[in-house]
Amino acid sequence: MFGKKIFYGWYIVTASLFIIILDGLLLYSFGVFLPYLNEDFGLSRAAGSSLFSFRSMVQAPAFILAGRLIDRFDPRAVIFGGGLIAALGMFMSGIAETTWQLYISYGFFVGLGDAVLYITCVALVSRWFMKKRALAIGIITTGVPLSGLITNPLTAWLINGYGVRNAFFALGLLMMTVIMAAFVLRARPSDKNLRPYGEEGSAHDEKRGASDGTPKEKSDWTALEAISTPSYWIMYSMYFLGFTTFLIIVTQFYNFEIDLKVAALAAAGPPAAIGLGSIIGRTLLSSILAEVLEYRKVLLICFLAQGSSIVLLLVFEHIWAFYLFGFLFGFFYSAWVPIFPTLLGKFFGLRSLGTIYGIFGTSYSIAAIGGPILAGYVHDVTGSYVYPFVFTIICCYIAAAGAFFVKAPVRKTA
């Protein structure tokens, strides 16, 4: 795979993995912080969950901005700057005294900075690989579940040992250290006098633009052309439904266990199992199953299985069932995440992928705005998570049905 000399794109993959781990840290830690923030600030489940929703409202336009920035400017400056903003938000959250201060620190600053960490790395890695692109994207997006495996018990340990505020400080300091990985990044293979991994071409091809990881003009789509196709919006809807499910589970699962009188540190284990399942699933499903089965079949299988795993939470109230659920949920969730950016690059080319994927990422933000706060509100009204969990199962099954309608778009000719 590496030949005589390690291809620099694999260094890009490694650095991107660490950066996306930070994105996962911000995602998974909120579910652990939530019950303590609710208690300290006197918030209901819906009000506490609205912090995550507000953060996601900030992220929606920030995703589009991040995509445009990574298409135009040095990724080192863009991603390092975003990481520092998010770390600053964590520090500010640790000193917040009122709810509105928490909205500014965690909602605005963390949301703004976090928007740069995931979208940009996926778009960047896509430029460096023609072959093994799905594998490369699968590796870096493993950063989210890998972070989940570590973040839940780490955050719970920090809170129980040192308090909520010191936990914010510690995670902010960790972010400032890890974001240094951004300085390894380069915008395009041509910056290192290279061609994308697996690309065959001449020096003449390289000068024409192949070396920047983008296809030739005839296969390039603009962002406006891409979002004018039915396939784009079908995938957008599936992504939205999948992340509505994921975010309701991630933000409410820890609370669900606490309601059942599971001890705080023990309750951190099953959410971490989502991370473990995702790591194993992303390795097996993305790199093996996706190579054997047609992508629509992979999407169908994974969405159906992900939804079905939630039934365990409705039937059992035992810790072993929570661990089993966490592993299965993460295992099947993991495969569909890298498939979508891979399909976007395959369908629409790479030259404008940052912008295209940035717009696509707003589906995550919309899911994050509505899903957690809806689940929290329903719990406030009913005192139960049964209805939110049933809702997530329905979302997964609808997303699975969407797999039958995804197909390569045909470009309109004048």
Image: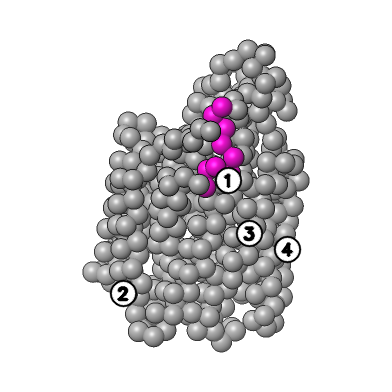
Is the magenta region chiefly helix, strand or loop? helix
Of the image marks 3 and 1, the number of the one nearer the N terminus: 3
First to last magenta residue range: 218-227
Q: Amino acid at mark 4?
A: Leu
**In the displayed structure image, the side of residue 226 where residue 325 appears, left or right:** left
- Measured in 3D between alpha carbons, the distance from the residue under mark 2 to the one under mark 4, in whole angstroms, is 37 Å
Secondary structure found at label 2: helix
Mark 4 sits on what residue? Answer: 88
Of the image marks 2 and 4, the number of the one nearer the N terminus: 4
Which disc is residue 386 wearing?
2
Kindly indicate whether the residue at mark 4 contacts the one at mark 2 (C-beta within 8 angstroms): no
Secondary structure found at label 3: helix
Q: Amino acid at mark 2?
A: Val
- Measured in 3D between alpha carbons, the distance from the residue under mark 3 to the one under mark 2, in whole angstroms, is 33 Å
Expressed as whole percent of the image width and height from the top left, the position of residue 118 reads 59, 49
Secondary structure found at label 4: helix
Residue drawn at 41 percent across, 50 percent down: 234
Expressed as whole percent of the image width and height from the top left, the position of residue 83 reads 69, 54
Disc 1 crowd rating (10 Å Cα; few below 14, some 14-19, many 20+) is few
Q: Quadrant of residue 272?
A: bottom left
Expressed as whole percent of the image width and height from the top left, the position of residue 77 reads 76, 46
Queried whether the magenta region covers residue 58, the answer comes back as no
Asked if 364 appears above or below 70 in the picture, the reply is below
Foreground of the two, 351 or 390:
351
| Residue at the extreme front | 414
Mark 3 sits on what residue? Answer: 61
Disc 3 crowd rating (10 Å Cα; few below 14, some 14-19, many 20+) is some
- Measured in 3D between alpha carbons, the distance from the residue under mark 3 to the one under mark 1, in whole angstroms, is 16 Å
